[in-house]
Image (cartoon, rainbow, N blue to C red):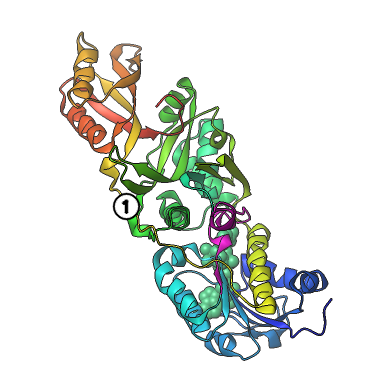
């Protein structure tokens, strides 16, 4: 240990799932951390709402005065683990203004205020790191920012929300419907009391914004991300998906699109999609996360692991803390926000995707050709059609179910087709519409 070095002081804001693990690692691994950093890493205080002597940290280390803790002269690095957007934003801005380096796991904040925070870090010449904000323990921000800095990232497709992945995996493996799989996830502590941010895709959209910003050197916020949740996915969709050799995953997709004229745009979107069973993302089950990256020179890369949980997330936080501390000891800074490319963000309507449409139709001749005609009118080519007879409770034929999978077409053409199908007399009901991603035959 290089004890002659001035210690690096750390303030941890938040002592919840992640904060308590970060505090534990700082205390338990003090010697190793000092050797890796080149100076001792010293915990100066922990910000909480409830100051009490039963919190596993000496009570004189705790404070509910965040501003005072952040402003201490002996604090060099502020680790924000309070969430949500406020009071985290105010505390981080204050820390940056006072030239403290900042580490945060706060995706909700990074997806809306990245510009403001990056600017404050730039102005103060300090580090702002947020590896843990996407996919918990999985290193993905640093590989995109540093390891792939000399390559051109084409696509990032991730399963970045453990709650929804658990629910969809349950539905797939047990045939459960959405409500009972959600109840299971809640009972096991995978879903919060209010699951909206997870099941409606807001959490994944925040992560998509962060990934797209870094991958494409363009500032992307959560509002730029097209978003659909998983609440409408049914057991019948899983049955159809399986018959087509697929499963269903909530994907966060960030993509670079090049027009025939060579103009580049980007897309960031979140929705449940059919994924072929032989795609690496199809095997990511339960609460695990994975991020699949395609880059021009590197080809395909897959990052897989625990996307949440106190200790896994603390691992990513501590990686950032060590980097920020080393920079303090050695002088200099890590990579800053890169947004030179300023690529336009494409609305969903222009995005080429494949659709899966599941509908109930009347049982009469000519139905299939009427349905196919609506696709043809909009130049949407059909890849697969499956038709099965439906019977009522008395075993009488009562119509048919048709499943259509298309080749790639623009999202606008596909949505127009679905709207036209819904208006056909022979179509009783559109049961569901999902996109298909990751198939080799586009
Ligand atoms: P948590 O368990 O709810 O803990 C939040 C902590 O922040 C608590 O200790 C709370 O104090 C403190 N806090 C909240 N508001 C405060 C305020 N106004 N003043 C002072 N202290 C305040 O949260 P978490 O699960 O550890 O998550 C922390 C952050 O990490 C969030 O941004 C989250 O999105 C992110 N993250 C979490 C995970 C995960 O698996 N949990 C994964 C990736 C990223 P009290 O204890 O006194 O109430």
Snapshot quadrant of residue 169: top right
Residue 221 rendering spot, x and y as whole percentages: 38, 60
Specify start and end residues of the magenta stretch as a single range. Answer: 127-149
Snapshot quadrant of residue 11: bottom right
Which of 427 and 14 lies nearest the eye of the viewer? 14
Which of 180 and 132 lies nearest the eye of the viewer? 132
Please give the name of the residue rendered at 45% of the width and 21% of the height, measured from the top-left corner: 244
Q: Is residue 194 above or below residue 237?
A: below
Which of 140 and 257 lies nearest the eye of the viewer? 257
Q: Is residue 260 left or right of residue 246?
A: left
For disc 1, the marked residue is 345
Which of 406 and 357 lies nearest the eye of the viewer? 406
Please give the name of the residue rendered at 46% of the width and 33% of the height, measured from the top-left corner: 438
Under circle 1, the secondary element is loop
Residue farthest along the top direction in this orientation: 365
Q: Is residue 61 left or right of residue 428?
A: right
Asked if the stretch drawn in magenta spans residue 135, the answer is yes
Asked if the stretch drawn in magenta spans residue 364, the answer is no
């Amino acid at each position: 240990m290089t004890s002659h070095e001035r210690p690096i002081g750390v303030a941890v804001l938040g002592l919840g799932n992640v904060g308590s693990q970060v505090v534990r690692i700082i205390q338990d691994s003090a010697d190793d951390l000092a050797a890796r950093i080149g100076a001792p890493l010293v915990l100066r205080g922990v910000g909480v709402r409830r100051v009490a002597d039963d919190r596993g940290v000496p009570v004189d280390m705790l404070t509910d005065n965040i501003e005072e803790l952040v402003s201490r002269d002996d604090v060099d690095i502020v680790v924000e683990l309070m969430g949500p957007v406020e009071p985290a934003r105010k505390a981080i801005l204050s820390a940056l203004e006072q030239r403290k380096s900042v580490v945060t796991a706060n995706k909700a904040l990074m997806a809306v205020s990245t510009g403001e925070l990056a600017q404050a870090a730039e102005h103060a010449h300090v580090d702002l790191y947020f590896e843990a904000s996407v996919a918990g323990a999985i290193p993905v921000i640093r590989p995109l920012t540093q390891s792939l800095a000399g390559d051109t990232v084409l696509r990032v497709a991730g399963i970045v929300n453990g709650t929804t992945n658990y629910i969809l995996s349950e539905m797939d493996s047990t045939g459960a419907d959405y409500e009972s799989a959600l109840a299971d996830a809640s009972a096991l502590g995978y879903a919060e009391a209010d699951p909206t941010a997870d099941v409606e895709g807001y959490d994944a959209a925040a992560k998509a914004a962060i990934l797209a910003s870094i991958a494409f050197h363009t500032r992307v916020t959560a509002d730029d991300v097209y978003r659909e949740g998983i609440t409408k996915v049914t057991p019948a969709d899983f049955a159809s998906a399986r018959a087509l050799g697929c499963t269903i995953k909530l994907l966060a997709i960030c993509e670079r699109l090049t027009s025939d004229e060579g103009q580049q745009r980007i897309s960031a979107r979140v929705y449940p999609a059919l994924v072929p069973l032989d795609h690496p993302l199809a095997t990511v089950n339960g609460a695990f996360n994975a991020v699949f990256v395609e880059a021009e020179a590197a080809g395909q890369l897959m990052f897989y692991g625990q996307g949440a949980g106190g200790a896994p997330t603390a691992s990513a936080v501590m990686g950032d803390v060590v980097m920020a501390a080393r920079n303090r000891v050695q002088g200099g800074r890590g990579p800053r926000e890169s947004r030179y490319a300023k690529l336009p963000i494409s609305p969903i309507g222009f995005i080429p995707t494949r659709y899966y449409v599941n509908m109930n139709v009347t049982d009469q001749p000519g139905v299939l050709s009427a349905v196919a005609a609506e696709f043809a009118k909009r130049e949407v080519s059909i890849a697969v059609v499956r038709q099965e007879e439906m019977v009522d409770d008395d075993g009488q034929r009562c119509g048919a179910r048709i499943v259509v999978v298309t080749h790639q077409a623009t999202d606008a053409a596909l949505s127009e087709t679905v709207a036209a199908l819904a208006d056909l007399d022979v179509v009783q009901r559109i049961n569901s519409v999902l996109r298909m991603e990751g198939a080799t035959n586009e």
